[in-house]
Image (tube, helix red, strand yellow):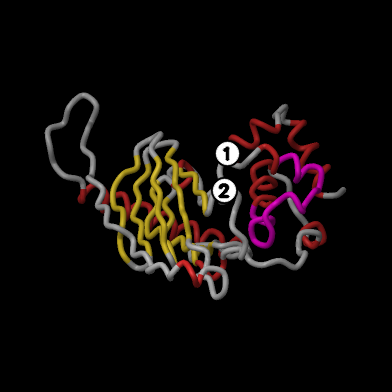
Amino acid sequence: MAIGPLLRQARQVRNLSQREVAERLRIPVAYVQAMEEERWEALPGGHYRRAFVRAYADWLGVPLTPEALAALSAPSTEGPYSRSDRRPRGKSLLRFWWAGIAALVAVVSGIWWHVQRPTGNTGPAGDARTTPVVEPASVAPRSPSGDAGVGASPTPIRLRVVAEENCWLEVYADGRRVFLGTLRAGESYRIEATTQVRLATVGNAGALRVFVNDQPVPPLGGLGETRRDVIFDVSRLPSREPPSPP
């Protein structure tokens, strides 16, 4: 069976709506519809397309064969981000090994987080909060207006993160740290850089929604998980300007 009908059938067996799936995976409903109808051109290309399909299939427990994934290998540029902590596709032994490393990193990160939190008066709401360190990201000087058009500078990286639950973040823009602290549930933060944005540490990765130039990024991890060195590089951005947000 093709990928789309397989995903739709698995979703219907679980009595889930497309909107429920979209909310769980933190992607637009239109992407869920496109995957089930196999309208691959409606999805971002390259790594994004494969990441969305894999995330949907993994969440439903649907195994994807190499033959099925071959349908997604149409030539396209790689997505605008890379993750140094991707778990390799290998045998169970390697998966267990990486799971152990991830658990160790999560424990060390949690201890470091609590050590770094300032000791203050503990009220009923447990209001011990690390004050974010915000520094202006470096901005390339603008060329004279007469030079616009020919030899224009590359599209900058505009990153927006939204916390659905409290998330610990350490963010660098063009090599400079611009944020260090806790992003509270419901809060958002915007970063702009000319070459690269690096999320050095993301605590509670599953609760963080990320948008690059107003395009949603697949989930960085699960709730309670810690991710490190998630990189968004201007050299891997699409050449066209993304549409303005509604």
Question: Label 1 to label 2, Cα distance in Å?
Answer: 14 Å
188 vs 234: above or below: above
Q: Would residue 32 be found to the left or right of residue 191 on screen?
A: right
**At numbered mark 1, what does the secondary structure look like: helix, strand or loop?**
loop
Is the residue marked by circle 2 packed among few (<14), some (14-19), or many (20+) residues within 10 Å? some
Residue assigned mark 1: 246
Which is more foreground, mark 1 or mark 2? 1
Q: Residue at x 67, y 55 (%)?
A: 44
Q: Which residues are magenta?
A: 32-51
Q: Residue 41 in magenta?
A: yes
Q: Position of residue 1 (x, y in %)?
A: 87, 48
Q: Position of residue 191 (x, y in %)?
A: 40, 54
User: Can residue 93 be seen here?
Assistant: no
**At numbered mark 2, what does the secondary structure look like: helix, strand or loop?**
strand
Q: Which three-letter amino acid code belongs to the residue tagged 1?
A: Pro
Q: Residue at x 77, y 64 (%)?
A: 74
